[in-house]
Amino acid sequence: MDRIDIMQSQNFEFLISVWPELASLAGFAEHYAYLNPQSALTKLRKIAERSVTVVC
């Protein structure tokens, strides 16, 4: 089973109870926004990919 490390997010905490993986990715993206923008974009891309796979 995959382990999800939860990274706290200022803007996406409401997702933790429903979609913890996206909440964690959003937290990492927020954390990396200024320190490492390329990593933040990678996390945001993962959020988009995961949300599309669930919706479709």
Image (cartoon, rainbow, N blue to C red):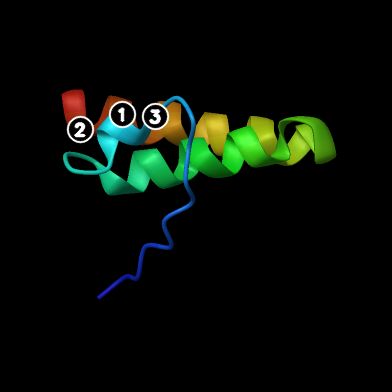
For the residue carrying disc 3, how many other residues have a C-alpha within 10 Å: few (<14), some (14-19), or many (20+)?
Answer: some
**Observer-nearest of 50 and 10:** 10
Is residue 46 visible in the rendered image? The answer is yes
Q: CA distance from mark 1 to mark 2?
A: 5 Å
The residue drawn where x is 37% and y is 62% is 4
* Mark 3 touches mark 2? (CB < 8 Å): no
The residue drawn where x is 60% and y is 36% is 29
* Mark 3 touches mark 1? (CB < 8 Å): no
Quarter of the picture containing the N terminus is bottom left
Q: Which residue is mark 3?
A: 12
- Could you tell me the amino acid type at mark 1? Ser
Count of numbered tags: 3
- Residue 38 point in image, percent of width and height: 77, 35
Q: Counting residues from the N terminus, which is met first, the one under dot 3 or under dot 2?
A: 3
Label 3, secondary structure: give it: loop
Which of the numbered marks, if any, corresponds to residue 51? 1
- Could you tell me the amino acid type at mark 3? Phe
* Mark 1 touches mark 2? (CB < 8 Å): yes
Q: Is residue 24 left or right of residue 34?
A: left
Q: Which residue is mark 2?
A: 54
**Observer-nearest of 23 and 50:** 23
